[in-house]
Image (cartoon, helix red, strand yellow):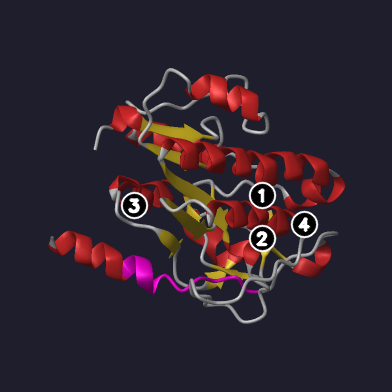
Amino acid sequence: MNRKQILFTGGTGLLGSNMKKMFTDALFPTHQELDVSSYSQVIRYFADKEIQTLVHAAAFTSPPKVDTNPIEAINSNIIGTSNITKLCIERNMRLVYISTDYVFRGDRGEYSEEDAVFPVNKYAWSKLGGECAVQLCPNSLIIRTSFGSDIFPYESAFADQYTSRVGVSDLTTKLLPIIEDQNLKGIIHIGANRRTVIDFARRLDPSRKIGEMSIGDVNFNVPVDTSLNCSKYNKWLQESSNK
């Protein structure tokens, strides 16, 4: 595919900054250039561009900040995603939406793409709102995942929360073939095997001492176990490699 016809929203974020290293010919507009919450600005920005695939990674992602500012989450994660979805439907573009493992209740883990969703905090509800819009686009793919920086940014990590979180470089590598497969649609989970957040943090830097903390130590709702069943992705990757 022509990488000059790929556009990433959220280009200045953690994931977008890493994707730029692999998609050097793609478009990565700044928030000032493309404010997804304004449909008129979205229309103007795309008026003179030929885009084949739009990867929507722009989001308001901090659960505690969403709790105190839900309107921003609505504007970015729900209205913004709806605007992007409308554009993709109108222009027949492929839409790849970066969602979150937090859409699940978190009471058992190892969630598959077919399992029921039930967010436990406002951030997750806003991302699920985005998923609802994307489901209306026939040429779309929802990617549920969990990722963080390659260097754990905190002094302590949850010892009682389970996840499939990966480092952003690892996720970028996994996303590359997904984005280039124009025929893949629906929902797919991408992540690592089930582990605690502190295990994820310590594996990033085994020589560093990272302290333990509990999800009960924070003042926002944290799901206990949102680990993902990624067998669909693994099967797709194997089949793609055999082609």
Relative depth, front residue between 170 and 97: 97
Q: Classify mark 1: helix, strand or loop.
A: loop
The magenta region covers 225-234
Q: Residue type at mark 4?
A: Lys
In whole angstroms, how far apart are the C-alphas of marks 1 and 3?
A: 30 Å
Q: Residue type at mark 3?
A: Ile
CB-based contact (under 8 Å), mark 2 and mark 4: no
- Visible residue check, residue 115: yes
CB-based contact (under 8 Å), mark 3 and mark 2: no
Q: Is residue 169 left or right of residue 104?
A: left
The mark nearer the N terminus, 1 or 3, is 1
Q: Which residue is mark 2?
A: 157
Relative depth, front residue between 201 and 186: 186
Q: Which residue is mark 1?
A: 154
Q: Which residue is mark 3?
A: 178
In whole angstroms, how far apart are the C-alphas of marks 4 and 1?
A: 23 Å
Q: Is residue 150 left or right of residue 157?
A: left
Residue found at the very far left of the displayed protein: 243
